[in-house]
Image (tube, rainbow, N blue to C red):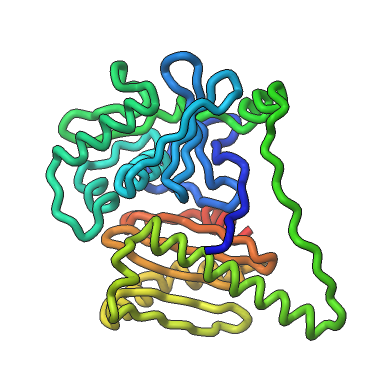
Amino acid sequence: MSSTKIQQPRVPSEQHQHLDKKATPATTPDSSYYVIGQIKNGQLVHFDPTCQLLTTWTEQQETAKTELSFSSSRLLEMLIRRADTVVSREDILTYAWPNRVVTQSSLNQAISSIREQLGDDFEKKIIQTMPRRGYQFNSRFLISIKEWLALQNEAGSIPSTPSPLPYTMATPSHRIVQHRHLLLLALIIFLLVTLVLRINFSLFLQPDLVISNQQAGHQQLIYTATNKDQLSALQTEVTFLQEKLLSLPEPPSILLFNRMYSFYDIICINQESKVFSMLLHESQLSNITDQQLLACAK
């Protein structure tokens, strides 16, 4: 696969946001990392869910890298995305171990391993156990963008963002062709990463994978499902959400909808080829806010 552009760490705004099931934040390419403060030694941990990688920093110096398993990475990402909200064990097992039958001991081992990497294996303040209910990520340990940039400025090690490759546009028609190629390239790359790493690797191994590609005015609508019945159901379920997204002042150029168990992935690609996505629980679909929609289409 082609190389991936390195992004700034994913961190919340200066004031920590308290998220519940009806307020799952949108994910953007500029926020593909999380920065977590450890309990001990004042260390910071970068979490990159795309690469399933934890990177530990001590005194602004990179000191360790740990590759998480597929399930552990999905587990941690889910808890962070729903920080300050209790996530049930059933939801975690369904999302982190798709199409597998696992026991509670697998979940306990994954939680224990993540806590150890975060230096939280004794105090258990970052990932909190809620007896008979599930687990909750404490947003107090998510580092703000202002604090992160200040620390990196002190160390003089802010990762640089590569400038886009220049290209010339000789004629208007050439510009349109190049722009469409960029959109398609961004979509292909994002689909591969999303479907393989975040949704379900076995999806590509199924010969009956169904993809529906529709045109609504200037917008392209893409639906993916494992069979025709699920595809039809998905199109019906997201009709309301699709109409709201297309009615925005600047709707996305491409919309992709996918469902995995009780979660929906909504991917938006705007006219500048920027990719945004939302991960929504089925209970959130009818309660999504205009702010969340705008975040996915900005």
Number of callouts: 0
Can residue 249 be seen by looking at this rendering? Answer: no
Residue 240, image quadrant: bottom left
Q: Residue at x 57, y 45 (%)?
A: 31
Residue 80, image quadrant: top left
Which is nearer the eye, 296 or 106? 106
Q: Residue at x 22, y 48 (%)?
A: 93
Q: Residue at x 42, y 55 (%)?
A: 279
Can residue 227 be seen by looking at this rendering? Answer: yes
Which is nearer the eye, 23 or 126? 126
Q: Extreme right residue here?
A: 170
Expressed as whole percent of the image width and height from the top left, the position of residue 253 reads: 61, 72
Expressed as whole percent of the image width and height from the top left, the position of residue 225 reads: 33, 74
Expressed as whole percent of the image width and height from the top left, the position of residue 24 reads: 44, 47
Expressed as whole percent of the image width and height from the top left, the position of residue 228 reads: 29, 83
Q: Residue at x 58, y 35 (%)?
A: 13
Which is nearer the eye, 290 or 7? 7
Q: Quadrant of the C terminus?
A: bottom right
Q: Relative to residue 168, is residue 2 depicted above or below?
A: above
Q: Extreme top residue here?
A: 41
